[in-house]
Each structure stands twice: as C-alpha cells, then as structure tokens.
Image (cartoon, rainbow, N blue to C red):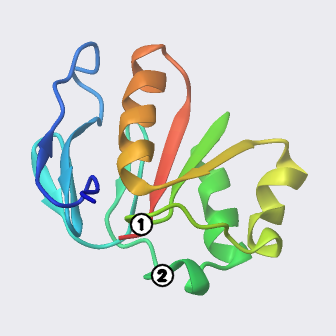
Amino acid sequence: MQNDYDSSVKIERDQAYGRNAFTGYGEGYVEVNRTRYAASLVVSAERLVADWPPRSLEALTAADIEALLAFKPEVVLLGTGATFRFPEPRALAPLARAGVGLESMDTPAACRTYNILLSEGRNVVAALIL
C-alpha cells in the first residue's frame, strides 16, 4: 500500500500569493513557498518558525502548544507525521483554554487543509511534526 510520503507531491497555489503556503511535501519534508524544510515547523500566513522544538508526537508539550497562541490563530492544524496519531490531551490544553480550534491529522492532510483555509481568508496555523 502506498502512502502520501512515498513520492514527492507538488501543490499548486491559487490565492496565496504574498503569504506562506505549502507548495509540496514528501517523505520527511514539506515545502513552503518552494523552500524545503525537514524539521518540525510552524506556518502561518505571515510567519514561519523553522525550529519548532518537538521532534516527535511524544515530545510535544503544553509549552510547545501554548507558544502557538502568539500567532492568534482561530484554528491550529497539528500535523502528526506520515500517519495520523492522537496527541496527548494534556499537551493540547492551552488551546482549549484559549478557545482556539484544533484539528489533528497526518502531515500531508494538514498541508492541504492549511492551503484551503488560507485561501478562504481564515487565520490558520499549521504546526507540523516532521
């Protein structure tokens, strides 16, 4: 069975010019505005943090999630890697307390969903564990 990480995928950008958007992904990397990243990162329309600390879902802490509140998102997309996995609920508590929506999904789905929400003008943040 083939998964989304078996080969590179290029994403065509529609209405995201001038903003950070995913332009591709593959095994162990994502591309934002045609620049490749191979470590965990956080992406919003105007900001990109290329050194987001968690290197695995097990390493994700409430402090990592709380740092996302500085982006003032209405929704956070948490990319959990090549496959969807459930994050530890205690790590996600800061978003719940702040009333910020969270969707957890595999990283390829998070990239695609982010681009759709971005094109709709939503204040979305993608936090990806690679």
Q: Is residue 4 left or right of residue 93?
A: left
Residue at the image point whose x is 70% and y is 64% from the top = 66
Asked whether 58 or 63 is in front, the reply is 58
Q: Name the residue beneath numbered marker 2.
A: 56
Q: Name the residue beneath numbered marker 1.
A: 81
Task: Identify the amino acid type marked 2.
Answer: Ser
Task: Identify the amino acid type marked 1.
Answer: Gly
Quadrant of the rendered structure where residue 57 is? Answer: bottom right
- Tag 2–tag 1 contact (CB < 8 Å): yes
Up-down relation of residue 91 to residue 47 (above or below): below
Screen quadrant of the N terminus? bottom left
Residue at the image point whose x is 85% and y is 52% from the top = 96
Q: Earlier in the sequence, mark 2 or mark 1?
A: 2
Viewer can see residue 91: yes
Viewer can see residue 73: no
Task: Give the image location of residue 10, x and y in percent.
Answer: 12, 38
